[in-house]
Image (cartoon, rainbow, N blue to C red):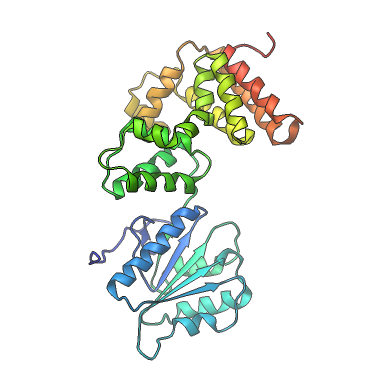
Amino acid sequence: MPSPRRPAAKTPASAIPQLSWRAPQPAPVVLVSGPEEICAERATAGIREYLRAEDPSLEVSDVRADDYAPGTLLGVASPSLFGEPRLIRVSGVEKCSDAFLAEAIAYLDNPQDGATVVLRHTGSSVRGKKLLDAIRAGTGGGVEIACPAVKRDSDRFDFAAGEFQAAKRRIAPPALRALVSAFTDDLTELAAACQQLIADVEGDISEQVVTRYYGGRVETTAFAVADTAIAGRYGEALIALRHALASGADPVPMVAAIASKLRTMARVAGSREPSRQLASRIGMKDWQVDRARRDLAGWTESSLGLAIQAAARADAEVKGASRDPVFAVERLVTVIATRAPYGA
């Protein structure tokens, strides 16, 4: 049976409850906002499961806000002859038609009993802002489930850790780091990998298990290239780079990953604060601070600055400033691994 509904915390920016996408609950109107699609899908699916657990006769309707026939929203939200609960999933609110916008705003003044309307807005445009403002002001008795972009390493780490926590499964920290490093470009793939391990592996999940499932991918990840280059292992770094490129790795996210590690090293360099205190201050995890400090062995302020400048140049070149993005990455790896200007 579903757990009793409890009031959720409110944020200063909104007059309505803010719910986690991992713990969604129905309301007359549910605004699922933000660009992270996998989180939005989980939130919507969770609401459907919640409602279906309360009443298996739940009717589910899908509506497109951008290709909208007038009268559709009220038609699918209104009670049927037998009064089954209704779930209306509305996609594309960020590109909604004028007809949908007008009818959705009007609907907030008179939500239908037994209906849950889920409005998906990716935030990619300001279209529908009047509707979002009305929902966030409390009109319609709504709640909001924010799905912000997961971009930072620490965010991906938290996401993956949450997957295992939600399933009540234990994964060793090195295994979790290896798994996250293997899927730096696609959160959907990271989520699928977590779920595969949860479904297939009995007991605790070790680093050896992750290597068995995703070893090839881990070995060719951009972070593996960065790690060997930063450690000064030039030959290994070039082999890892060519292996990654041969496996279809894109130079753009590869340079981004390398630059990210260099920036982390720069943020940690020179600080003598305890790892936990420094991590809290700069928005990182303890293990990331510890790792960056280990990576800094043998580096000087001058060599680190040179590497960061090389990363900035490579970033511009792989995004169009050069006709040979592969050479741009190879030059960057050379500068990092040798800790000297290219060709010196």
Query: Which residue occupies the foreground of this view, 211 or 191?
Result: 211
Q: Quadrant of the C terminus?
A: top right
Left or right position of 249 against 38: right
In this picture, is 250 found above or below 35?
above
Above/below status of 237 relative to 130: above
Q: Position of residue 303 (x, y in %)?
A: 57, 13
Identify the residue at horizontal 50%, vertical 48% (top origin): 149
Q: Residue furthest top?
A: 344
Q: Residue at x 40, y 82 (%)?
A: 112
Residue 211 spot, x, y in % from top left: 40, 32
Residue at horizontal 49%, vertical 28%?
219
> Which quarter of the picture shows residue 320?
top right
In the picture, the quarter occupied by the N terminus is: bottom left
Q: With respect to residue 333, does 119 lie above or below?
A: below
In x, y percent, where is residue 216?
48, 32
Left or right: where 45 falls relative to 123: left
Q: Of residues 88 and 286, which is closer to you in this image?
A: 88
Where residue 202 sits, quadrant-wise, is top left
Above or below, comparing residue 243 to residue 127 in the picture: above
Can see residue 260? no
Q: Report the residue at 54% width, 17% height from top.
A: 236
Question: Where does the image place residue 240, in percent across and percent down from the top left?
Answer: 55, 24
Residue 81 in view of the camera: yes
Image label count: 0
